Amino acid sequence: MIEKKYDFLIVGAGLFGSVFAHEMTKRNKRCLVIDKRDHLGGNVYCEEKDGINVHKYGAHIFHTNDKKIWDYVNQFATFNNYINSPISLSKGKMYNLPFNMNTFYQLWGTKTPEEAKAKIDEQIAKYGTKSPQNLEEQALSLVGKDIYETFIKEYTEKQWGKKATELPAFIIKRLPVRYTFNNNYFNDVYQGIPIGGYNVIIDGLLKDIDTKTSIDFFENRTELEALAEKVVYTGKIDEFFNYKFGQLEYRSLRFENETLDIDNYQGNAVVNYNDAEYEFTRIIEHKHFEFGKQSKTIITREYPENWDTGKEAYYPINNDENQEIFKKYKEESLKLKHVIFGGRLAEYRYYDMHQIIASALKKVDEISKVEGLD
């Protein structure tokens, strides 16, 4: 029997695949990481332009409450003290996010938590319902009419390409409301951006590991699978099984970058554009993620789009119909002992970065216990 060159063929060089490869290499396993894109790093990849690290696939802000995960990523990069404090533009006015005492003052002129809470409770009583049947009814029942119409309705309809009354209520099971003057979007203890961009982390994870880019797994499947004992697959699960149970749905994004000969365009890394008159949902000004002092600036307008197989799949549409299809693929995947499925696309769920890393580490631990690697 011919010995395989690698123990693991890892399809996808994003965070899941990179963490898995790094950890298995530490356990003396031979790994090959491939990606169909022309670069490593998946969606956290940063493109350096004019000294600015551009988040090529949308803003990525690292945040976690898990000290183990925080310590893990800090092996590979030094993080700055960036705090995500987005601004929201609605009907010509600027507001702070998330919904907090600054937002309520800007909206109503309320100055105390008691005044703000009374206003919200009054609107929930007037416009809410005990059994919300769609996203609009759910939002009205959580925060009332003013917040819903100012910040949620048009933004969400752009994001999902559907009317709020046509979207399921579960999309917003909760809406964070803070009765403090705190513009920190995340509640997590640890937060920041890696100095030098996320490529620093990916380069650290994949140091001395065999990698190949611009390789389509499905075009070279037989040849590639013959190289390794096992496959770690991080792509779309329905594509792996040739869509035998039907195609899963996603929402996609389109990014338009613009370089400007000014040093500061909007004074903030993230500004949401709520109103329907703007086709994009937000503008990212990348230099502010790393407190840049460059003479130029680069902005990105983010446009939500309907997804098809020629576009990147960003957000799974986890409605009942898609979950039923995914369940069939999940059952099929469990039958394959030589293939490990992991990550956002293979598990058909939205992950934050720290969750992907935790998921990869957990999978490595499970395999290590079974095979006695630790």
Image (spheres, rainbow, N blue to C red):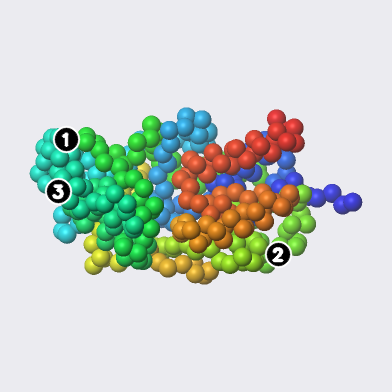
Residue 332, position as x, y percentages in the image: 67, 56
Residue 149 shown left or right of residue 215 in the figure: left
Q: Residue furthest right?
A: 1
Checking the image for residue 65, the label placed there is none
Alpha carbon separation for disc pair 1 and 3: 14 Å
| Count of numbered marks | 3
Image coords of residue 84 (percent x, y) = 32, 42
Residue drawn at (15%, 54%) of the image = 93
Q: Residue 107 carries which label?
A: 3
- Residue at 35% over, 64% down: 166
Percent of width and height locating residue 324: 55, 59
Contact between marks 2 and 3 (CB within 8 A): the answer is: no
Q: State the separation of the CA atoms marked 2 and 3.
A: 56 Å
Mark 1, residue position: 113
User: Residue pushed farthest front?
Assistant: 130
CA gap, disc 2 to disc 1? 60 Å
Q: In the drawing, does residue 370 fall left or right of residue 253?
A: right
From the viewer's side, name the closer residue of 271 and 99: 99
- Say which element carries label 1: helix
The residue under label 1 is which amino acid type? Pro
Q: What element carries label 3?
A: helix
Mark drawn on residue 220? 2
Mark 3: amino acid: Leu
The quadrant where residue 164 appears: bottom left
Residue 98 in sight in this render: yes
Looking at the rendered structure, the secondary structure element under dot 2 is loop
Residue under the point 27% across and 47% down = 142
Q: Residue at x 80, y 50 (%)?
A: 4
Q: Nearer the viewer, mark 1 or mark 3?
A: 1
Q: In which quarter of the image is residue 277?
A: bottom left
- Closest to the observer, 328 or 161: 328
